[in-house]
Amino acid sequence: MKRKADVVIIGGGVNGVATAYALAKAGLDVVVLEKNYLSSGATGKCGAGIRQQWSTAENTELAIRSVQMFEHLSSDLGMDIEFRQGGYLIINHSEKELRQSEENVEMQKRLGLNVRLLDISEILSIVPVLDLKGIKAVGATFCPTDGHANPFLTTFAYANAARKHGATISTHTTVTGIKTKDQHVTSVKTSKGTIHTSWVVDAAGVYSKDIAKMVGIKTPNKPYRKEVLATERLQSMFEAMVISFTDGIYFSQQQEGQIVGGIPIPHEQIGLYKTPTFSFLRHMSQTLTRYVPLLRHVNMLRHWTGFYDVTPDARPILGEDRTVKGFIHCHGFSGHGFMLSPMVSKLLTEYIAYEKTSPILDRLNLDRFEGSNLTQEHSVVG
Ligand SMILES: Cc1cc2nc3c(=O)[nH]c(=O)nc-3n(C[C@H](O)[C@H](O)[C@H](O)COP(=O)(O)OP(=O)(O)OC[C@H]3O[C@@H](n4cnc5c(N)ncnc54)[C@H](O)[C@@H]3O)c2cc1C
């Protein structure tokens, strides 16, 4: 194993390898350390939806600029990541939600997004199989450039491209400690030896809290268990991802025909419990068939569990720590870290390689939690 690197990245999920690619392309000597295999964390469990419709400007801007990068990522990385843009349909169920949607759409349009409010008669032209009465829909928003990509292929494509630019990716290598001198990172201790470095990127997902603790930093992140189900393959019915903030459900039909989706687990407790539950299956099936009664007789084939790494304002924690120099936060994605990864890796690379900061990195720094005025992201599901 290498004993020295410009940057050590902890975590072989999509954010770790995307950042490795961008840094290696900028000419830095990068090592990624992953305790299991690539995409073994949240990345390999995720819905991989890509949505630009958020309630906060930071998430919206990160997502818009990420989609611009996703649009040519397959050719940039030299591998098809199965990116497709079927749009996201967000159902509104009340006047209150409609008003929030109007506010969101106004802000999103100001940032340049092609998004619109739909009245009830327009919803079925996007997803004809919905039972609008059953779900008490009063309106919706739709953005046609939202979409989906394959999370495994995206991670592998970034990793392969990073290697081509000289990055080293060490899987089955666990980080056990980080040394600092005068509040500056100096080395990373692993199960396979020590690497000297002055930059560490904490992209360890739900374990990022433990990594931060190694240098005495406390983060407010909490692990939220999430379950997903996939049905058997069906004839193509719709292209958009359907979501509801009231019911917490999200689902889409994959290119191969399966319906894949999730919903919060009733009476869920915070913690790292991995066992899938029957209560999720029942709640998800009942809600899904209320949305699409046609699915009542469809077989469910798979069901799995993953974790969101959730922050108090549902926005990521990014950028250099104010107290430990060289320690870069890249976590707290709160259920939307796949879709933001292209832009997050770009901003972190500009900061590390070119000392270029950005207003988004400033506003999403860990130190925002010291104040009492958090800007809450409201547009969260599942
Ligand atoms: C059910 C579910 C559905 C989701 N749906 C979506 C969606 O539709 N769209 C979206 O954008 N996001 C979604 N997400 C969120 C998304 O999956 C995550 O935000 C994103 O994948 C985070 O990527 P990451 O690289 O930051 O972290 P991860 O993928 O979690 O990777 C972190 C890695 O760090 C490694 N690691 C941890 N500790 C150590 C250590 N000590 N030493 C070495 N390695 C270590 C882990 O093994 C892991 O592989 C979903 C998540 C879940 C669970």
Image (cartoon, grey):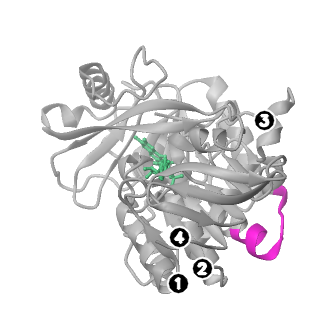
Q: Is residue 262 magenta?
A: no
Q: Residue 227 falls in which quadrant of the image?
A: top left
Up-down: is 340 above or below 107?
A: below
Q: Disc 1 versus disc 4: distance between alpha carbons? A: 23 Å
Specify the label residue 375 is tagged with. 3
Between 324 and 188, the one nearer to me in the picture: 188
Which callout, 3 or 4, points at the residue further toward the start of the chain? 4
Residue pointed to by mark 2: 24
Say whether marks 3 and 2 touch (CB < 8 Å).
no
Q: Quadrant of residue 16?
A: bottom right
Region of the chain picked out in magenta, as a range:
349-359
Q: Earlier in the sequence, mark 1 or mark 3?
A: 1
Mark 4 nearby-residue class (10 Å; few <14, some 14–19, many ≥20): many
Q: Which residue is mark 1?
A: 166
Estimate the x, y position of residue 86 in percent, counting from the top left: 43, 60
Look at the numbered discs 1 and 2 and tell me whether their residues touch, using CB distance below 8 Å. Answer: yes
Residue ID for mark 4:
70
Residue at figure coordinates x 42%, y 29% from the top left: 272
Identity of the amino acid at label 1? Gly
Q: Is residue 358 inside the magenta stretch?
A: yes
Residues under labels 1 and 3: Cα distance?
A: 39 Å
Total labels: the figure holds 4
Element under disc 4:
helix
